[in-house]
Amino acid sequence: MEIPFVDLAAQYERLQPDIDDAMQEVIDDTAFVRGPYVNEFEEAYAEAYGVEHCISVANGTDAIYVVLRMLGIGPGDEVITVANSWISSSETIGQTGATPVFVDIEPDYYNINVDRIESIATALDAGYRLFDSAELYGNESRIGDLLDSPGTPDREGLFLLSKVWNTNHEHVAEACEGTLAELGIDALDAYLLHWPEAWAYQGPLSDLASLPPAEQEALTFPTDADGAPETADVSLTETWERMEDLYDRGLTRSLGVCNVSLAQLETIAESARVLPSIVQVESHPYRPRTDLVEACHARGIRVLAHSPLSAPGLLDEPVLVDIADEHGVSPAAVAVAYHVDRGVVPIPASNDSDHVAANLAAARLRLTDADRDRLATLEDPEFER
């Protein structure tokens, strides 16, 4: 996938007098191997390939370049790159003088997905009954196989939720029907827009996990000539009307939207025949999304919090650690209880069977007024991944 050329070396040298603060900001958004990981994929890459540093940067190619320079990467070095986002890092690596090395990550990719399936089985055994999925995750057929296995709770005892990806805003029926076929069910309990933005259609996204990573990227993160996401001229209102058609057909019992702002939610509500029943957004003490949560509760909309434990540094926050020590629980349990206390449903992700069970038990933790006041001090309006 091509990206437009930007002379990052020249840009770096020009900005050098003012870049110290920016470097620190990049460090804050970076996870190094042997330190905390942003997710299990980075840890798997590090272990599989014996790399010295595993970098996760959310700020684009310029930030990746700065981090590589900070690490002293240059001519003679090799940098492993994995194409798992719409930004290709190969040219960025090349501008340091180092050689980008593309690796076949499929064995580790599939092992990780197997672990996720095993964690779903563990979650069922622990008592979880709401399962959050999406066509982007590429594992719905495997989940369907699991749900069809002996000993799995009856369909009516589960709440199955899935999401339509950005490239399918004009093809929500095709996407929903594909999800139903892969899960082996007649109707979802909830079907959500994964993001409010519409991207260019690339065809069906059936069983993505079976495709090589480069094909997954091409199908799910289309780019234009400038390397930016290739958008589609589809309004949020138009997409929501298509979602309502699915509800009318009985393919889903409720509708929802993810990663939405309050303004975007109001845009949907102004014209909707069927209001969202669920809004799913990233939320944690750094970013509580209080205005959105209160607006949803006023409309009777249930709020689900994704990524409730994965914000960098959250579980090491002294406030969380102190509250956890006082209650005799883990910081993760406090982070989960934080949402339950606000009437928000947290959706933690884990491949560890002990953590899966502990996250469910954390919902029983009762926070005090003093706990709430201390957690409120963690809100950071500038928080970004």
Image (cartoon, grey):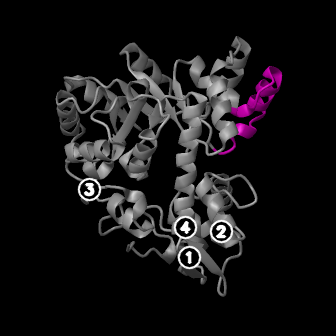
**Which numbered disc, 4 or 3, marks the residue that appears first in the sequence?**
4
320 in magenta:
yes
Which mark is on residue 48? Answer: 2
**Which numbered disc, 1 or 4, marks the residue that appears first in the sequence?**
1
- 77 w.r.t. 84: above or below: below
Q: Residue at x 58, y 58 (%)?
A: 57
**Which numbered disc, 2 or 1, marks the residue that appears first in the sequence?**
2
Q: Secondary structure at mark 4?
A: helix
Q: Percent x, y for residue 355?
A: 67, 37
Residue picked out by circle 1: 93
In-front residue for pair 297/233: 297
Report which quarter residue 380 is drawn in.
Answer: top right
Residue picked out by circle 4: 107
Label 2 crowd (10 A; few <14 / some 14-19 / many >=20): few
Q: Measure how far apart labels 1 and 4 are at the Cα level.
A: 24 Å
In this view, the mark in front (2 or 4):
4
Residue range highlighted in magenta: 312-332
In this view, the mark in front (1 or 4):
4
**Which numbered disc, 3 or 2, marks the residue that appears first in the sequence?**
2
Q: Percent x, y for residue 104?
A: 52, 74
Q: Is residue 122 left or right of residue 84?
A: right
